[in-house]
Amino acid sequence: MAGITIDRCLCRGLAFADLLPTARAEGWDLDDMVRETGAGGRCGLCRPYLRRMLITGETVFHTIITGEAG
Ligand code: FES
């Protein structure tokens, strides 16, 4: 698993680091982010990362995170 870097919603081409400041400023939860930006709204594979980003503020991940489709 070495070398994995996940830092964006690939479907929408949106970097987590670009999404986080707005999400914080607007108080978005995951549903808000999907609605407002489209991130997480297609394949959904980035959703667990978006969810964790909103909790921890991390924007770059080096491990696979799975979870409920959310
Ligand atoms: S990678 Fe974000 S919806 Fe597909």
Image (tube, helix red, strand yellow):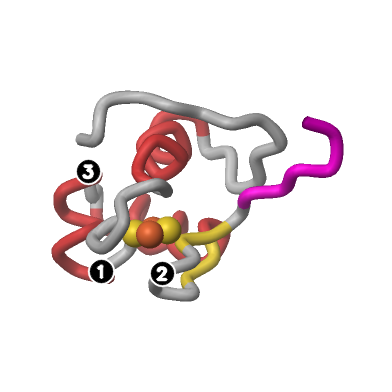
Mark 1 residue CB less than 8 A from any atom of ligand 1: yes
Residue drawn at x 52%, y 57% as measured from the top left: 16
Residue type, label 1: Gly
Residue furthest to the top in view is: 67
| Residue that numbered label 3 is attached to | 29
Side (left or right) of 70 relative to 25: left
Dot 3, how many residues are within 10 Å of its Cα: few (below 14), some (14-19), or many (20+)? some
Mark 3 residue CB less than 8 A from any atom of ligand 1: no
The residue nearer to you, when weighing 15 against 3, is 3
Span colored in magenta: 1-6
| Residue that numbered label 2 is attached to | 11
Question: Which SS class for mark 2?
Answer: loop
Residue drawn at x 52%, y 38% as measured from the top left: 57
Mark 2 residue CB less than 8 A from any atom of ligand 1: yes
Q: Is disc 1 in contact with disc 2, using a CB cutoff of under 8 Å?
A: yes
Dot 2, how many residues are within 10 Å of its Cα: few (below 14), some (14-19), or many (20+)? some
Side (left or right) of 25 relative to 14: left
Side (left or right) of 21 relative to 36: right
